[in-house]
Amino acid sequence: MPRPRQTYNDCVVVVFREITGEDKNSAQDHFVPHLTGESGISLAALSVCLKDAGWIVTPYDYAIQQVVEPDGSLSAAFRTFWTQFQGEAVVFYIKDDLKGHTILVRSGGVVFDPSPLAPENGEFIVDHFRRFPGKLTITSVSVVTRMLNTNNV
């Protein structure tokens, strides 16, 4: 089955769907209380919605500090960091100080990009950012993990 894709300014909701497996309507219901009338959905709203669905979002500031040069270009450390990465991370970024975007990065640095133009099977994060030339500013990286269900222990 094809993975969910962004249809308008809803990349955060689509990333949520990819993590949780929820359908479009139930995923959107999670976000309704967080809509402000402005475009985009914040990391705080995503964190609350994921927590409600049984996931934990943990800021991973080390990832931001180690991987991008001051001019916004990709460093060798960037490639190494994401090649060795294990798990799932939500990355919010801006290119050339324009509108932001959100992607999901899985183990080995494979990007799930909600854009309808992105490759269906993902791509390495370096290749993803090279498709869009310009200055990269990663605004946040957060690791996402499933909560343990302690009720059945």
Image (cartoon, rainbow, N blue to C red):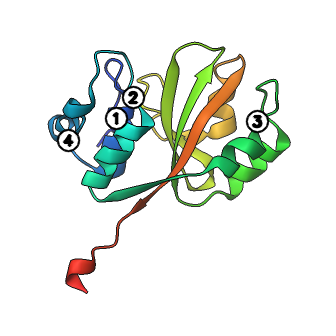
Q: Classify 10 Å Cα crowding around label 3: few (below 14), some (14-19), many (20 and above).
A: many
Task: Decide which of tag 3 and tag 1 comes sooner along the chain.
Answer: 1
**Which residue is located at x 34 percent, y 15 percent?**
38
Whether residue 146 is situated above or below residue 63 in the rendered picture: below
SS at circle 4: loop
Task: Decide which of tag 4 and tag 2 comes sooner along the chain.
Answer: 2
Q: Is residue 26 left or right of residue 112?
A: left
**Which residue is located at x 59 percent, y 61 percent?**
86
Q: Disc 2 vs disc 3: Cβ atoms closer than 8 Å? A: no
Please state which amino acid type lies under the numbered disc 2.
Cys
Whether residue 38 is situated above or below residue 25 in the rendered picture: above
**Is label 3 or label 4 in front?**
3
Q: CA distance from mark 4 to mark 2?
A: 14 Å
Q: CA distance from mark 3 to mark 1?
A: 25 Å
Question: Which residue in the protein does label 3 denote?
Answer: 68
- The number of numbered discs placed on residues in the rendered structure image is 4
Q: Disc 3 vs disc 4: Cβ atoms closer than 8 Å? A: no
Image spot of residue 85 (x, y percent): 64, 57
**Which residue is located at x 35 percent, y 30 percent?**
5
Q: Classify 10 Å Cα crowding around label 4: few (below 14), some (14-19), many (20 and above).
A: few
Question: Which residue in the protein does label 4 denote?
Answer: 23
**Which residue is located at x 20 percent, y 33 percent?**
33
Q: Disc 2 vs disc 1: Cβ atoms closer than 8 Å? A: yes
Q: Nearer the viewer, residue 15 or 108?
A: 15
Q: Which mark is residue 11?
A: 2
Q: Is residue 63 left or right of residue 21?
A: right
Image spot of residue 54 (x, y percent): 29, 59
Question: Which residue in the protein does label 1 denote?
Answer: 14
